[in-house]
Image (cartoon, rainbow, N blue to C red):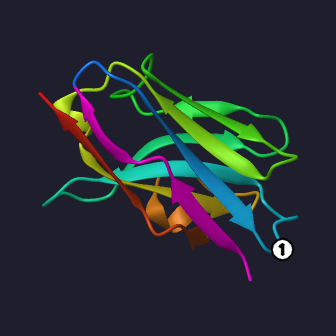
């Protein structure tokens, strides 16, 4: 059974940085891409970034482009989200997700098959 375990969340001041990790355990040989989403209180879960597992191609939401960087370490089966220049609007629970299908999109919840439990990021102004 595949599990995704996020870590690295916490409290940070505006302008600061954090790095999230998502470790993939279990049978992960069919991973096509990994993604990060976030959900703020009272809001829907939204796409943040995605990376293809094999080639490392990345896509970002406009709201984080230039500030966040998604990367992966295939040997460690871990995906990262480096977050710089954090703003109060970045406060949310962050989720990593795994997509096994090679077709379809990458920016909707339904595009992904497995989800982590989420980790809280709070940016204080």
Which quadrant would residue 11 be assigned to in this image? top left
Give, as a single range, the part of the protein colored magenta: 1-13
Residue beneath the point at 16% across and 58% down: 41
Residue beneath the point at 36% across and 51% down: 38
Across and down, in percent, residue 93 comes to 32, 55
Q: Can you name the residue that lies furthest to the bottom here?
A: 1
Q: Quadrant of the C terminus?
A: top left
- Would residue 6 be counted in the magenta stretch? yes
Task: Provide the residue designation for mark 1.
Answer: 27
Residue sitting nearer the eye, 100 or 74: 74
- Residue 106 in view here: no
Can you say whether 63 is above or below 11 in the image? Answer: above
Give the total number of marks visible in the rendering: 1
Residue beneath the point at 50% across and 48% down: 36
Can you say whether 14 is above or below 89 in the image? Answer: above
Across and down, in percent, residue 16 comes to 32, 22
Across and down, in percent, residue 29 comes to 88, 64
- The secondary structure that most of the magenta stretch takes on is strand
Secondary element type, mark 1: loop
Residue sitting nearer the eye, 71 or 111: 71
In this picture, residue 16 sits left or right of residue 23:
left
Query: Mark 1 Cα within 10 Å, few/some/many (few <14, many 20+)?
Result: few
Across and down, in percent, residue 109 comes to 46, 63
- Residue 94 in view here: yes
- Would residue 12 be counted in the magenta stretch? yes
Q: Quadrant of the N terminus?
A: bottom right
Residue beneath the point at 71% across and 62% down: 24
């Amino acid at each position: 059974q595949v599990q995704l375990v996020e870590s690295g969340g916490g409290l940070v001041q505006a302008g600061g940085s954090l790095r999230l990790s998502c470790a993939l355990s279990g049978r992960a040989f069919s991973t096509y891409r990994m993604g990060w989403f976030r959900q703020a209180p009272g809001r829907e879960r939204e796409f943040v970034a995605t990376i293809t597992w094999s080639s490392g191609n990345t896509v970002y939401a406009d709201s984080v482009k230039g500030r966040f960087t998604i990367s992966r370490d295939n040997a460690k089966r871990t995906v990262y989200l480096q977050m710089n220049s954090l703003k109060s609007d970045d406060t949310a629970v962050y989720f990593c997700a795994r997509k096994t299908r090679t077709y379809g999109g990458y920016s909707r919840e339904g595009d992904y098959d497995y989800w982590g439990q989420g980790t809280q990021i709070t940016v204080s102004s």
